[in-house]
Image: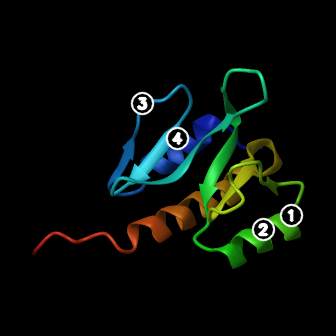
Amino acid sequence: MADAADVRRIALSLPSVEEIPSAGFDFRVGNKGFVWSYPERRPGERRRIRTDIAVLYVGDESERQALLLGEPDVFFTAHGYEDWPLVLLRLDAVDVDRLEELVTDAWHMRAANLPTSPA
Protein backbone atom coordinates (compact mmCIF):
# COMPACT_ATOMS: atom_id res chain seq x y z
CA MET A 1 0.00 0.00 0.00
CA ALA A 2 1.39 3.38 -1.06
CA ASP A 3 0.89 6.79 0.53
CA ALA A 4 1.69 10.49 0.07
CA ALA A 5 5.22 10.04 1.46
CA ASP A 6 5.90 7.49 -1.28
CA VAL A 7 4.61 9.91 -3.93
CA ARG A 8 6.91 12.62 -2.61
CA ARG A 9 9.96 10.35 -2.43
CA ILE A 10 9.43 8.99 -5.95
CA ALA A 11 8.66 12.36 -7.56
CA LEU A 12 11.64 14.10 -5.96
CA SER A 13 13.97 11.33 -7.16
CA LEU A 14 13.27 12.30 -10.79
CA PRO A 15 15.34 14.94 -12.63
CA SER A 16 14.24 18.57 -12.79
CA VAL A 17 11.20 18.08 -10.54
CA GLU A 18 9.86 21.02 -8.60
CA GLU A 19 7.53 20.65 -5.63
CA ILE A 20 4.95 23.42 -5.54
CA PRO A 21 3.86 24.59 -2.06
CA SER A 22 0.52 22.96 -1.35
CA ALA A 23 -1.66 21.65 1.46
CA GLY A 24 -0.85 18.21 0.06
CA PHE A 25 1.65 17.41 -2.69
CA ASP A 26 2.10 18.96 -6.15
CA PHE A 27 4.96 18.00 -8.46
CA ARG A 28 5.90 19.53 -11.79
CA VAL A 29 8.59 19.22 -14.40
CA GLY A 30 9.13 22.18 -16.72
CA ASN A 31 6.14 23.87 -15.04
CA LYS A 32 3.90 20.97 -16.14
CA GLY A 33 2.10 19.02 -13.44
CA PHE A 34 2.46 15.25 -13.47
CA VAL A 35 1.17 14.21 -10.03
CA TRP A 36 -0.62 16.14 -7.29
CA SER A 37 -3.09 15.73 -4.42
CA TYR A 38 -6.74 15.52 -5.33
CA PRO A 39 -8.61 18.75 -4.50
CA GLU A 40 -11.98 17.18 -3.74
CA ARG A 41 -14.97 19.44 -4.24
CA ARG A 42 -18.38 18.70 -2.80
CA PRO A 43 -21.40 20.95 -3.35
CA GLY A 44 -21.82 23.44 -0.53
CA GLU A 45 -18.47 22.57 1.07
CA ARG A 46 -14.97 24.00 0.90
CA ARG A 47 -12.42 22.21 -1.24
CA ARG A 48 -10.66 19.42 0.67
CA ILE A 49 -7.13 18.32 -0.29
CA ARG A 50 -7.01 14.52 -0.35
CA THR A 51 -3.49 13.19 0.09
CA ASP A 52 -4.77 9.61 -0.11
CA ILE A 53 -5.75 10.22 -3.75
CA ALA A 54 -3.34 11.38 -6.44
CA VAL A 55 -4.21 13.13 -9.68
CA LEU A 56 -1.97 11.52 -12.28
CA TYR A 57 -1.17 12.74 -15.81
CA VAL A 58 -1.64 9.88 -18.30
CA GLY A 59 -0.99 11.59 -21.64
CA ASP A 60 -4.05 10.81 -23.73
CA GLU A 61 -7.64 9.66 -23.74
CA SER A 62 -6.91 6.08 -24.80
CA GLU A 63 -4.56 5.52 -21.85
CA ARG A 64 -7.03 7.22 -19.55
CA GLN A 65 -9.87 4.97 -20.67
CA ALA A 66 -7.71 1.84 -20.46
CA LEU A 67 -6.86 2.59 -16.83
CA LEU A 68 -10.39 3.61 -15.83
CA LEU A 69 -12.02 0.58 -17.47
CA GLY A 70 -9.28 -1.92 -16.69
CA GLU A 71 -8.80 -1.16 -13.00
CA PRO A 72 -11.84 0.67 -11.60
CA ASP A 73 -10.82 -0.26 -8.04
CA VAL A 74 -7.54 1.67 -8.52
CA PHE A 75 -8.38 4.49 -10.95
CA PHE A 76 -11.43 6.74 -11.19
CA THR A 77 -12.48 10.17 -12.37
CA ALA A 78 -14.60 12.99 -10.99
CA HIS A 79 -16.56 15.98 -12.22
CA GLY A 80 -14.22 18.44 -13.90
CA TYR A 81 -11.71 15.79 -14.98
CA GLU A 82 -13.71 14.30 -17.86
CA ASP A 83 -11.96 16.26 -20.63
CA TRP A 84 -8.38 16.00 -19.38
CA PRO A 85 -5.73 13.26 -19.77
CA LEU A 86 -5.82 12.65 -16.01
CA VAL A 87 -6.95 9.89 -13.70
CA LEU A 88 -7.47 9.83 -9.97
CA LEU A 89 -5.45 7.14 -8.23
CA ARG A 90 -6.36 5.53 -4.91
CA LEU A 91 -2.94 5.32 -3.28
CA ASP A 92 -3.98 2.57 -0.87
CA ALA A 93 -4.92 0.39 -3.86
CA VAL A 94 -1.37 0.20 -5.29
CA ASP A 95 1.94 -1.01 -3.98
CA VAL A 96 5.03 1.20 -4.03
CA ASP A 97 6.52 -0.50 -7.11
CA ARG A 98 3.38 0.15 -9.15
CA LEU A 99 3.23 3.73 -7.87
CA GLU A 100 6.83 4.27 -8.93
CA GLU A 101 6.00 3.00 -12.43
CA LEU A 102 2.94 5.27 -12.71
CA VAL A 103 4.65 8.41 -11.40
CA THR A 104 7.73 7.82 -13.54
CA ASP A 105 5.60 7.30 -16.66
CA ALA A 106 3.71 10.54 -15.93
CA TRP A 107 7.02 12.36 -15.46
CA HIS A 108 8.39 10.96 -18.75
CA MET A 109 5.34 12.16 -20.68
CA ARG A 110 5.59 15.67 -19.24
CA ALA A 111 9.39 15.91 -19.49
CA ALA A 112 9.58 14.51 -23.05
CA ASN A 113 9.20 17.84 -24.86
CA LEU A 114 11.20 20.05 -22.54
CA PRO A 115 14.07 21.99 -24.07
CA THR A 116 17.46 20.60 -23.26
CA SER A 117 20.41 22.66 -22.15
CA PRO A 118 23.16 23.22 -24.72
CA ALA A 119 26.15 20.95 -24.19
Query: Going by the image, does 32 lie left or right of 48?
Result: left
Residue 25: percent from left, percent from top: 53, 36
For residue 71, the mark is: 1
85 lies above or below 39? below
Q: Report the Cα–Cα distance between label 2 and label 1.
A: 6 Å
Question: Mark 1–mark 3 contact, CB under 8 Å?
Answer: no
Indicate the quadrant where residue 48 lies: top right
Viewer-nearest of labels 4 and 3?
3
Residue where numbered disc 2 is placed: 67
| Amino acid of disc 1 | Glu
**Mark 1 vs mark 3, CA separation in Å:** 31 Å
Is residue 74 toward the left or the right of residue 56 in the image? right
Where the C terminus falls, by quadrant? bottom left
Mark nearer the N terminus (4 vs 1): 4
Q: Are marks 2 and 1 in contact (CB under 8 Å)?
A: yes
Point out the frontmost of discs 4 and 1: 1
The amino acid marked with disc number 3 is: Pro
Residue 83, how many percent across, how many down?
Answer: 66, 63
Label 2 crowd bin: few (<14), some (14–19), many (20+), radius 10 Å? some
Q: Mark 4 points at which residue?
A: 8
- The three-letter code of the residue at mark 4 reads Arg
As drawn, the label of residue 21 is 3
